[in-house]
Amino acid sequence: AFHICCNIGRISGLSGRRIPRFHLQRAFFQAWLNEKFAPELLESKPEIIECVVEQLDHMEANLKRAKRGDLKVSIHRMEIERIRYVLSSYLRCRLVKIEKFFPHVLEKEKSRAEGEPSILSPEEFAFAKEYMANTEIYLKNVALKHMPPNLQKVSLLKSVPRPNLDSFVFLRVLERQENILVEPETDEQREYTIDLEEGSQHLIRYKTVAPLVASGAVQLI
């Protein structure tokens, strides 16, 4: 009664197929961990989020129909709370990054090529634009208007720090990868390549594996 499925067509483009709750949650938890540990804002996952919200609605509806005193009710209520916590954490983490890097996030979205996945959901895009507008108004009213005319303009792209893509991250390899180019740590070293074996764990510079995080070949931990 509590096994929920979600239409996978919105996620993979394969219409008519159904994705079991276990696989949906695995994709959702992977997106959460990647977002939590990546130094930059990752691609938006609106289809997965929509499916998770639908799943929660179905589970709560099933709980209302369940018999009182049934042990399954307590177990599934705990499961609902767990999913809600992860969902809130995921969305909150993305909002923190948007607030921290908003001019760079909007610039990246603006320069996105046609057909390239968006890093912002429509709601996040509206939030980022409003946040930037409010920041500009605040700076103007509090500081800039009191300065000489030649200092009354400020470039937020230059003033706000960029995400540190050179930071190191822990990862677990989900799909074997060959000939990954690793940049040298010192001037005396040279570039070299490594193979990432499935199931292995590594500490590595984020920008080296950023494409693998995006493709789902590795999982940040």
Image (cartoon, rainbow, N blue to C red):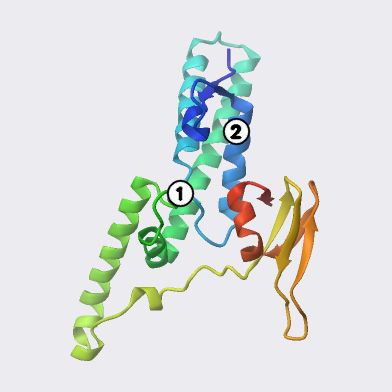
Left or right of 146 on screen, residue 82: right
Q: Which residue is painted at 77% across and 58% down in the image?
A: 202
> Which secondary structure, mark 1?
loop
Q: Residues within 10 Å of mark 1 (few under 14, many from 20)?
A: few
Image height check: is 220 above or below 205?
A: above
Left or right of 108 on screen, residue 214: right
Image height check: is 21 above or below 192?
A: above
> Which secondary structure, mark 2?
helix
Circle number at residue 117: 1
**Which of these two is toward me, 73 or 211?**
211
Q: Given the current orientation, which residue lies at the most extreme top position?
A: 67
Q: Which residue is painted at 79% across and 57% down in the image?
A: 195
Q: CA distance from mark 2 to mark 1?
A: 21 Å
Q: Position of residue 171 (x, y in %)?
A: 71, 54
Q: Position of residue 136 (x, y in %)?
A: 26, 70
Q: Residues within 10 Å of mark 2 (few under 14, many from 20)?
A: some
- Which quarter of the picture shows residue 179? bottom right
Q: Are marks 2 and 1 in contact (CB under 8 Å)?
A: no
Give the amino acid at mark 1.
Pro
Q: Which residue is mark 2?
A: 25
Give the amino acid at mark 2.
Gln
Q: Earlier in the sequence, mark 2 or mark 1?
A: 2
Circle number at residue 221: none
Left or right of 129 on screen, residue 117: right
Nearer the observer, disc 2 or disc 1?
1
